[in-house]
Image (cartoon, rainbow, N blue to C red):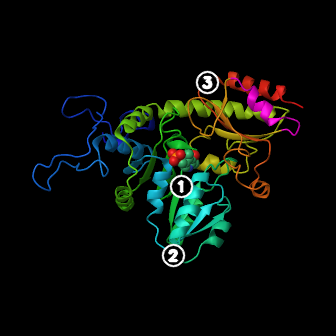
Amino acid sequence: MKLETAARFNTKCVHAGQEPDSATGAIITPIYQTSTFVHDELGQHKGFDYSRTNNPTRAAVEANIAALEGARSGIAFASGVAAINAVASRLDPGDHVVVDKNIYGGTHRLFEHVLRRYNISFSYVETAIPDNVAAALTSDSKMIYVETPSNPLLGLTDLAVMADLAHSHNTKLVVDNTFASPVNQNPINHGIDIVIHSATKYLGGHSDISAGAVISTNSKIKKILDSAKNFGGNLSDYTVWLLERSMKTLHIRVKEQTRNAKLLAKMLNKNDNVITVYYPGLSSHPSHDIAKSQMNDFGAMMSFDLKENVDVYTFLESLEIIKPGMSLAGVETTVNFPMKTSHGLLTQKERDNQGIGDKLIRLSVGIEDYQDLYDDLDNAIKKSIK
Ligand SMILES: *Cc1c(COP(=O)(O)O)cnc(C)c1O
């Protein structure tokens, strides 16, 4: 059986890209802690030459991640931002990119603080509305860059509609699939050219590594492989080993996180001190139908607005199990207060424009017992009513 293509998802998590070591039979890919590989004859090697370019430990995890996204090739990077950088470095001076207004802050900084200096221009639009994207495209547009679900309001972009739009304009469509993970969404099945992950999040899943990945079809990945090599930013082999270990339980973790999230979203939605819950799995979510059509399940990220009379600082301090933190997607549940953290540098007007309220809380749901999580949230809310 061709594991990479034929097996079902859970089997691929455990086995795709994983061959027993040919020298010893070790079931786990050894950490090939070497920078260089000896040539049989000058110019003749066994597929590995120099570890920045390629390394057997990394190749195994790359094959695994690619298989989970339904692609044939992937490249692992030292961070999500390094992955985005390698993709964006395919752009030339004069090129234009249409970008989702709600992208990750670090991506926005890379585009605005670095790439703009190389005469690459960016238009930020609400990609949830395809007409906005169509209106922003110019003859110089070479890329549409989308995050769905997006941060922190879990807005969705219709992937199939966006793929049609991109391809009719001869433009590449890049999707950051970090929030959904390959368990809950596979953009390549909807015609997307390039998929990016911050593997620091669900793929790693234990809040202990920094990593990234780019996944695509063979022909497209070749050019990105070139930029990866030229750029550095390759994932260290020790970290690859941890990532590989994580990948084998990806489906179990994320399915449990998603199950908890669905229950919590429903319970929070009924809580009198919560105004709105932003979760694609709720029928009240404006893009619930799109979520049903393009996501395998609704994911484990959500946000909610606390009522006016709840003091957010007291709420955050009163949580006992759930920890406030910047990152997300670990097995432990975390909360984030976008107004003071991820979106703290925006002006009040910019936040208002994006619908990021002063009482908005983002929740990354872990694998604890959902009732304990809900009780923690509910008790903290009750303690914080002014
Ligand atoms: C964290 C994150 C990134 C950046 O990844 P790093 O691993 O921190 O470099 C990119 N996109 C999204 C959606 C993220 O959450």
x and y, in percent, of residue 280 in the image: 67, 44
Q: Secondary structure at mark 3?
A: loop
x and y, in percent, of residue 202 in the image: 52, 38
The answer to whether the residue labelled 2 contacts the one labelled 1, judged by CB atoms less than 8 Å apart, is no
- Mark 2 to mark 1 CA distance (whole Å): 22 Å
Left or right of 40 in this view: 144: right
Of the numbered discs in the image, which one, if any, rests on residue 175?
1
- Mark 3 to mark 1 CA distance (whole Å): 30 Å
x and y, in percent, of residue 259 in the image: 62, 31
- Mark 2 to mark 3 CA distance (whole Å): 49 Å
Question: What residue is disc 3 on?
Answer: 368
Left or right of 281 in this view: 252: left
Question: What residue is disc 2 on?
Answer: 94
Q: Earlier in the sequence, mark 2 or mark 3?
A: 2
314 is within the stretch colored magenta = yes
Residue found at x 38% / y 39%: 240
* Amino acid type of the residue tagged 3 in the rendering: Glu
Q: Is residue 178 visible?
A: no
- Range shown magenta: 307-320
